[in-house]
Image (spheres, rainbow, N blue to C red):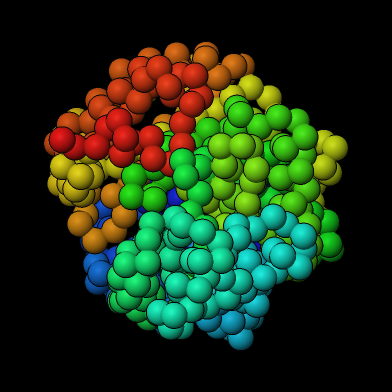
């Protein structure tokens, strides 16, 4: 087992990893930027190291600073959490060259997963269903129109290196296709320094369903069920639940098996997520692999009882999976609500500032993963998420009732948050029935 781990992240995920390490008797080293000097995770670490100024490019994305912190702290390994450098193949290679274990997949796997065109080709070789599309990059307007003619409108033009909804355009005719092609390339170039785009048929009103996988370095791969992540804003997730209520047993099995086949084909190890879209007819299609722990991993932990962070650490240490596929049982229903410091009434505008009141919820079935406290200053430099409310109950309806109660108990003052939006969503009849898709928030709760 590893002896000492540096956590190359901040906020609630840094705390989450520290808690997992504590239970495994592993020492932790916390890094922080100058903006995070008062961060909660620093109080729980065995050692802390400042890695630079507030901007993430000079701190949490600063590879030399992180490696220097790891070396002076004499760590065995680095856990990247999510975001920042968690899917950066170069960072993995640097860690390896310095004899520091990266707690995550290999650099090669991350590179393949990060290139959506390469990932789709891998999925096809593994006989995993993919959305009809270009089958590779498109580089000319004429090629865009040819592909659109072959698969039919509407189409989705996507950045190969994209994420978070950036570098994506929907087109419903030739004129929109040409304009969307240039807009997607331009946005992708600015966001990812890579203007490669490809085309897929646009699936109307899909659900976003993902499969959690675990794989060790000995060729063992399992999945831990599905998460429905359809409640989104601007292609970014807001609310997740497990299991997905609309899947029948056959589709549930087929989707899990497809995720496992893909992981085997990629030579994957560590925790990861295989993401699919589910159309109105119940057909699923692969869209991407996230080669890291996900923000929404707690809902899977709640319904399976598996500590995903501890499993990642054991896998990195070379241990075999502690569970087999037949051991995985889904119990009850779980939701996760991303509590962001942003104003839903103003197009989700970020709202940094000082939290002057912080009353978290509690009681049966409630979990609150957060790094904030009364007096905490939400900085403007990083993601706006300030906490995750997770509820787990025997049925989906009971989980909704518990979530309503927990959100009513929660009081965060000083900054606008997504709490009022979630209260409204939980009262919406379509949500209660499970009748949702990725356009649900824009359709019913977009600012007027």
Residue 286 relative to residue 91: left or right = right
Residue 379 appears in the rendering: yes
Q: Is residue 320 above or below residue 332?
A: below
Query: Residue at point 30% right, 23% down?
Result: 424
Q: Position of residue 31 (x, y in %)?
A: 40, 64
Which residue sits at x=59%, y=50%? Answer: 276
- In this view, 307 is above or below 321: above
Give the left or right position of residue 258, taking residue 340 as reference: right
Residue 216 in picture, x, y percent from top left: 77, 59
Instruction: Please indicate, yes or no, whether residue 238 appears anywhere in the rendered image.
Output: no
- Residue drawn at x 58%, y 75% as measured from the top left: 136
Instruction: Please state the horizontal and vertical placement of residue 265, each as a whole percent of the image.
Output: 77, 66
**Front in this rendered view, residue 211 or 119:** 119
Percent of width and height locating residue 282 = 63, 37
Q: Is residue 25 above or below residue 437?
A: below
Q: Is residue 149 left or right of residue 352?
A: right
Locate the N terminus by quadrant.
bottom right
For the view shown, which residue lies furthest in the bottom direction? 97
Corner quadrant of residue 177: bottom left
Q: Quadrant of residue 427?
A: top left
Above/below status of 133 relative to 254: below
- The residue drawn where x is 42% and y is 37% is 231
Q: Quadrant of residue 359?
A: top left
Q: Quadrant of the C terminus?
A: top left
- The one nearer the camera, 260 or 367, is 260
């Amino acid at each position: 087992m590893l002896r000492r781990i540096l956590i190359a992240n901040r906020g609630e995920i840094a705390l989450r990893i520290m808690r997992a390490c504590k239970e495994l008797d592993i020492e932790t080293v916390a890094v922080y930027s100058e903006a995070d000097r008062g961060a909660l995770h620093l109080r729980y670490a065995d050692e802390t190291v400042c890695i630079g100024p507030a901007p993430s490019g000079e701190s949490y994305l600063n590879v030399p600073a992180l490696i220097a912190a790891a070396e002076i702290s004499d760590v065995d390994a680095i856990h990247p959490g999510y975001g920042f450098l968690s899917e950066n193949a170069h960072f993995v290679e640097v860690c390896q060259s310095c004899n520091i274990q990266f707690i995550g997949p290999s650099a090669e796997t991350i590179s393949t997963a990060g290139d959506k065109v390469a990932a789709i080709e891998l999925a096809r070789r593994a006989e995993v269903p993919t959305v009809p599309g270009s089958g590779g990059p498109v580089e000319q307007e004429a090629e865009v129109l040819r592909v659109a003619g072959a698969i039919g409108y509407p189409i989705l033009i996507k950045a190969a290196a994209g994420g978070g909804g950036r570098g994506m355009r929907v087109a419903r005719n030739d004129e929109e296709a040409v304009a969307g092609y240039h807009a997607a390339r331009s946005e992708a170039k600015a966001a990812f320094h890579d203007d490669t785009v490809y085309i897929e048929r646009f699936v109307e009103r899909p659900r976003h369903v993902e499969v959690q996988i675990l794989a060790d370095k000995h060729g063992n791969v399992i999945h831990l069920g599905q998460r429905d992540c359809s409640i989104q804003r601007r292609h970014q997730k807001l609310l997740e639940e497990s299991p997905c209520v609309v899947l029948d047993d056959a589709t549930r099995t087929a989707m899990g098996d497809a995720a496992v086949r893909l992981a085997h084909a990629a030579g994957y190890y560590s925790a990861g997520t295989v993401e699919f879209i589910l159309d109105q007819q119940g057909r699923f299609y692969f869209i991407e692999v996230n080669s890291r722990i996900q923000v929404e991993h707690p809902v899977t932990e709640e319904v399976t009882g598996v500590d995903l962070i501890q499993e990642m650490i054991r896998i990195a240490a070379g241990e075999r999976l502690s569970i087999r596929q037949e051991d995985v049982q889904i119990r009850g229903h779980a939701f996760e609500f991303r509590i962001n410091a942003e104003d839903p009434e103003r197009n989700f505008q970020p709202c940094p500032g000082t939290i002057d009141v912080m009353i978290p919820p509690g009681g049966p079935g409630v979990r609150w993963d957060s790094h904030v406290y009364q007096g905490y200053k939400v900085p403007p430099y990083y993601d706006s998420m300030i906490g995750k409310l997770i509820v787990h109950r025997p049925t989906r309806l009971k989980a909704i009732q518990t979530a309503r109660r927990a959100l009513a108990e929660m009081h965060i003052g000083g900054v606008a948050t997504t709490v009022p939006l979630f209260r409204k969503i939980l009262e919406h009849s379509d949500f209660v029935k499970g009748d949702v898709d990725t356009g649900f928030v824009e359709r019913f709760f977009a600012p007027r």
